Image: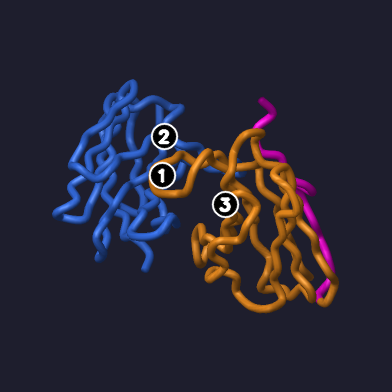
Chain colours: A orange, B blue
Amino acid sequence: DAGVIQSPRHEVTEMGQEVTLRCKPISGHNSLFWYRQTMMRGLELLIYFNNNVPIDDSGMPEDRFSAKMPNASFSTLKIQPSEPRDSAVYFCASSTGLAGGYEQYFGPGTRLTVT
Amino acid sequence: QQPVQSPQAVILREGEDAVINCSSSKALYSVHWYRQKHGEAPVFLMILLKGGEQKGHDKISASFNEKKQQSSLYLTASQLSYSGTYFCGLNNAGNMLTFGGGTRLMVKP
């Protein structure tokens, strides 16, 4: 299996621009998680989906962030407009069940830099 | 609320042992442990479920004390490949994991 796939791997953009991060979970996994990692705040859960339905988005920092999962093999995280404080590594992870009892497989991450 | 991990960093010589602790102020249902190498994604090590179990694989094992709301990761006879940052992820309620701040482990020859 190819594992969780994320694109792009690196993104550099200017403040105010729209940014779209993409994720393809492992085939057969029904839960998908978006995390953000920074030195200051560590690894934070932004939102997670189960069977393509958003279950909890309480970690999404503000309305500038949105996430979708139109089908079982694709999810996007969009930031519009982007700000320098959004600079971070964004990870997508998938699992065969919900967080408590199932291991999560992380993608390689997207390193976002907003100038 | 973020779990508390200790120590924040540790340096070992190859062959030495280490213990990493993770504690929560809330009741725990499960504990996950992950290792992340610099510039890479976190990689799953093990899950411990409610019930005070211990798990191990190779020379890395962990315990989970739900009454004390804490978990410990034990690294025995450390190898160079053990270097990285170790994170505990706690499931307090619902289906989310909350990760600790990480413990940076460096194993030197």
- Asked if badges 2 and 3 are on one and the same chain, I answer no
For discs 2 and 1, the disc positioned in front in the rendered view: 2
Quadrant for the N terminus of chain B, please.
bottom left
Few, some or many C-alpha atoms within 10 Å of disc 2 (few <14, some 14-19, many ≥20)?
some
Pointer 2 with pointer 1, Cβ within 8 A? yes
Q: Chain of mark 3?
A: A
Viewer-side residue, B97 vs B3: B97
Q: Which residue is mark 1?
A: B86
Residue B93 screen position, x and y as percent: 35, 60
Q: Chain of mark 2?
A: B
What separation in Å lies between label 1 and label 3 (alpha carbons)? 27 Å
Quadrant of res B100: bottom left
Residue lying at 59% horizontally and 46% vertically, measured from the top left: A93
Q: Is residue A40 above or below residue A9?
A: below
Residue A52 in the figure: left or right of residue B53: right
Few, some or many C-alpha atoms within 10 Å of disc 1 (few <14, some 14-19, many ≥20)?
many
Which residue reaches farthest left? B67
Give the magenta part as a residue range: A1-15
Quadrant of res B91: bottom left
Residue A97 in the figure: left or right of residue A71: left
Q: Residue A115 magenta-drawn?
A: no
Pointer 1 with pointer 3, Cβ within 8 A? no
Residue lying at 45% horizontally and 45% vertically, measured from the top left: B85
Q: Which residue is mark 3?
A: A50
